[in-house]
């Protein structure tokens, strides 16, 4: 269910969505991954269960070829049995209080995920609250960084193929945090009917 929407341009829209990200019918789902692409728990585990074992096998092969992904980095695989075409694995940081570069690493993960979607020709992208689960990143700050990084990327890439970014979470309190971030960043026009 779409809870908030912000039209950035004639072709670019951001949405807050309350849904199971593994059920999203989009071009790409962003996975909140760890550097080894070991999809055991949280969003990564849910994506693996829905996509099927081939997702983990493909991820293992990616790491074997390219090595561990640093915080802020991304990789991509096929999407297995998901409705999406691709899974973009974005490695967010574990929260250690914020003084070890965690905000910058989370911003890089979001920016790099969008750049990869652009490179792969993926127009509609669903993104969870990267790092806010078992990695402990504060949800309010996560929402602020992810939305800000997305707006900045789209503004600086006017010819991007990315037309829709959906901040999709199944957890109602997390969705509410993203709603508040949208309300703060995109206040309603008081003259609108």
Image (cartoon, rainbow, N blue to C red):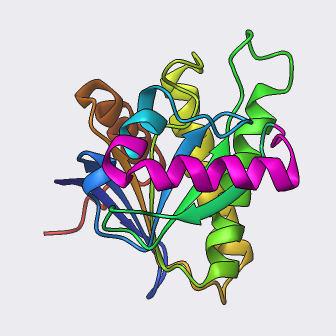
| Residue at point 28%, 24% (across, down) | 173
Could one spot residue 187 in this view of the protein?
no
Residue 24 lies in what quarter of the image? bottom left
Overall secondary structure of the magenta section: helix
Between 144 and 189, the one lying in front of the other is 144
Q: Is 40 placed above or below 170 here?
A: above
Between 185 and 128, the one lying in front of the other is 128
Residue 120 lies in what quarter of the image? bottom right
Residue 154 lies in what quarter of the image? bottom right
Q: Is 35 placed above or below 21 here?
A: above
Which corner quadrant holds the N terminus? bottom left
Spot the residue most to the top.
97
Magenta segment range?
A: 48-70
| Residue at point 55%, 19% (across, down) | 138
| Residue at point 73%, 58% (across, down) | 112
Q: Is residue 95 left or right of residue 140?
A: right
Q: Position of residue 174 (x, y in %)?
A: 35, 29
Q: Is residue 97 left or right of residue 44?
A: right
């Amino acid at each position: 269910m779409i809870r908030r929407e912000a039209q950035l341009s004639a072709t670019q829209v951001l949405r807050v969505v309350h849904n199971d990200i593994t059920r999203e019918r989009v071009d790409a789902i962003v996975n909140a991954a760890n550097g080894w692409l070991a999809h055991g728990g949280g969003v990564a585990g849910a994506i693996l269960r829905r996509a099927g074992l081939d997702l983990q096998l493909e991820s293992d092969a990616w790491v074997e070829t390219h090595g561990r992904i640093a915080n802020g980095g991304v990789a991509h695989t096929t999407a297995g049995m998901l409705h999406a075409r691709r899974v973009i694995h974005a490695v967010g940081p574990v929260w250690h209080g914020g003084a070890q570069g965690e905000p910058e690493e989370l911003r890089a993960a979001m920016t790099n995920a969008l750049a990869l979607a652009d490179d792969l020709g993926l127009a509609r992208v669903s993104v969870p609250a990267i790092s806010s689960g078992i990695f402990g990143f504060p949800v309010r700050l996560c929402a602020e960084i992810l939305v800000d990084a997305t707006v900045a990327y789209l503004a600086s890439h006017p010819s991007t193929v990315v037309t829709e970014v959906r901040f999709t979470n199944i957890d109602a309190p997390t969705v509410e945090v993203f709603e508040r971030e949208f309300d703060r960043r995109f206040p309603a026009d008081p003259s609108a009917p």
